[in-house]
Image (tube, rainbow, N blue to C red):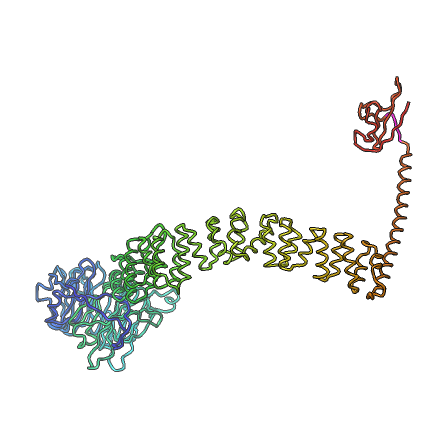
Amino acid sequence: MAEKLPANSDSGTDSTEEEEEVEPKFKYQRIANDLKNILNADVVTCTAVHSKRLQFLIFGTFRGRVYLLDHQGNSVESNLSSTEQHTHKVAVNQVDVDPKGEYVATCSDDGKVNITGLFSCENNQNLSFGKCIKVVALDPDPKSRVRRFIVGEDKLTLYERNLLKKLKPTELCAVEGSVLSICWQGNFVAWASHLGVRVYDLSEKCSLGLMKWEVPSQARLENFRCHLRWSNEHTLLIGWVDTIRICVIRKRNGIEAASSNLPGYVVDPVSTFQTTFYICGLAPLASNQLVVLGYRKERSATYKALRPVLCVIEYKMNSSEEICTDSLTLRGFEEYTVNDYSLGCIIEENRYFIVAPKDIVVASLIETDDRVEWLIKHSKFEEAIDLISTHGGSLPILSVARLYINHLLTLKQYEDAAKLCLRMLGNNKALWEEEVFKFVKCQQLRSVSAYLPTSEDCKLDPHVYEMVLYEFLKFDAKGFLNLIKEWPPQLYDGLAVINAIHDNFRKQNANELLESLALLYSYQGDFESALRMYLKLQNKDVFELIRRYELYDVISKLIIPLIHLDRDRAFKILLDKKKIKPEVVVQQLEQNQEYLYWFLDELHKINSSNVFQRKLVELYAKYDRSKLLPFLRRSKEYVIQDALAICKREGFYPEMVYLLGCMGGVEAVEALNIIIHSISDIEMAIEFCKEHNDNDLWNVLIDESIKQPEIVTKVLDGIVDYVNPEIVVSKIKLGQTIPNLRESVIKMLWHYNSQKEVLCTSHEIQLDDYFDSHSEVVAFRRRAQHVSYDHHCPQCHRPVLMKSTSHRNGLVAFKCGHIYHQLCIPGSTTSGQCGECNMGNSDRSEEE
């Protein structure tokens, strides 16, 4: 059976430092079964791999035997195993298989070249050269049926079998030293000698030139095996010592072909680069990638060989980059040299056979499932998920995702684990609930809360959401409030959450918990409790709640707290009688007179005829006297005696003056005395007397002014046009000193003279205007009025003038121009108005 072989990915050298493992490019299996028994007694020296139809492995050994095995290491019965004649006496140097897998060519240092049919002896050939033969190659053409093969010795020789089945040798090219390696593809044969590598064109029978190779500084070139491989019909890969060269065989263009007598094809090296190790074999992988088996130049501390490496190299123009490097633990690697290893491949399947003297390992490109397994093993879950999403695989992506979630929880990366749940679990309710309980064990439901599904498409069990809320309530009150705001209330049992808040209420988180209670009560329809919570918080969202749910009936007992919270927004609701009656508001505000004053003052602005104006007198007197007098003047809805009593109590003299003045009589005299004695404003007293124009008030004012000589002149100046100044002057006592009396008397006399002149002038103007108007009226009245036969009576519609009449006919003419027969308007002639246009002032005339 095949045994899996672990490979270590490193940079190409042993290091005691731990490095992050790179994802392997290959998976490895050691070939066992019968191969293991064979290698217990012998050593592999060369191999050949066949991929088509039969899929087998052929290898030669140090004892000269050749074995045929399948790719699992089981022996396959063939002519190689049925007889001893096909074995060599010494180590086998080269093994090659024809394209159909029917014949195998081998050569050895015993000087023999054997062409052996695996299952037929028809075209077997046994050649003896009497000297060491290092290389042999069969024709790669499937139609050849082993008609041709090439042997490399001190010259390159092509052997062809003719119709008589006899071999005809043809020397292709002389060799510098001996032929070290051959690789045949189509018409081109690449081979290596002690100087370098040549390509021979069998169709043109010429060499395409020599590519010289750099000789190692401390070794001979022929001491290193040259590795040749055709990646396609025109691309040759060369690996020798520590240098790799990529060559393209191209046809010369017309200019090159015409310029000289040169072969039709030319070898173009497109990339040449060095490696950090000696090359033991190479094969193509992708368009610009190679798989290279390497032998490390360094030695261990005991001067033994290090593990060989299988390296993937990406090449460009004369440069390269190692994509990955795997160190391989092959049996006995410490004792091997660079030439002990070789690399076989099946290009179509990207399978590579790593051959050592005591071991054969198969490297295959790692498949999706293997890559996923490796990524999971190395905790690279994100890459594993991406790989399955792109390329599929047998492992469900959700299984990998759940492993990833477990891994993140183990690393305490709770937020990342929650995000992964959202990304991978979708609307799978069962999986969500299973994964959420993992967060419960870690007490990290807070991390997953933002990602839990809350839509109708995937609504979890209410208990899940309640667990999340309880954890927030316990550890993060602000987060708890945010969830109450964000989550639809139908996700959980609101009453259970309310009870949990009461059971776990903490004063340090009172604001968050009260707001949460307000929201929860709102969701439950208990709006009065919700309002109380908001009011405890002094949260102005209470007004939005009232507006949204029209809770105007609920707020009747919460009016004072609402005003205390925000007077403007509260009054916007309270002043709308469609929402709440003013009587209800006033009743609630009786216990807070200042709030009552604010409310009634605003109410009076929008409704000046409300029934609460009586209260405003006392409220204005208490909280804003500046508004009292304008209110008293403006409103008539208060009891004047009650208002006067309040003003007397508070000592508001201007307001008392106004109220007493409104009452008139004796109260007006009292008001005047208040102005004179309490307010001491003589101008105001004079204006008060002018406003009421009462002789008794003027007498009181004059009597009081005589007692105060300094105000006599002001009274004299103010009573002009209202009281005869002689009354004031006559009451002045002889010898009494009146300041500015002379100026005041002169001013008064000047005023009277001016008034007299004005009256005389206006009288003259009036008389002139009267006589002018009278003259115009008289002239108008005397003016004749034309009457003709064209005039018709508006009443009977006949001409007013008729030539033959049996009796006299009178006419009535109006100033508007209408003329009637007197008989047509009996009894109306004295009315003085035209019945047609209703104009007045008519003149009557008679005509016989």
Q: Is 642 in front, or is 81?
A: 642
At 88% from the left and 17% from the top, the residue drawn is 806
Q: Decide if residue 580 is on the left or right side of residue 248.
A: right
Q: Decide if residue 578 is on the left or right side of residue 205.
A: right
* Residue 385, picture quadrant: bottom left
Horizontal and vertical percent position of residue 349: 24, 61
Residue 787 highlighted magenta (yes or no): yes
Q: Is 518 in front, or is 391?
A: 518
Q: Is 79 in front, or is 145?
A: 79
Image quadrant occupied by the C terminus: top right
Image quadrant occupied by the N terminus: bottom left
In the displayed structure, would residue 566 be above or below residue 284?
A: above
Horizontal and vertical percent position of residue 123: 14, 61
Q: Is residue 44 visible?
A: yes
Q: Is residue 347 visible?
A: no
* Residue 739, picture quadrant: bottom right
Residue interval drawn in magenta: 785-789
Q: Decide if residue 475 is on the left or right side of residue 118.
A: right
Horizontal and vertical percent position of residue 440: 29, 61
Q: Main secondary structure of the magenta part?
A: loop
Q: Pick out the residue farthest to the top.
A: 806
Residue 696 highlighted magenta (yes or no): no
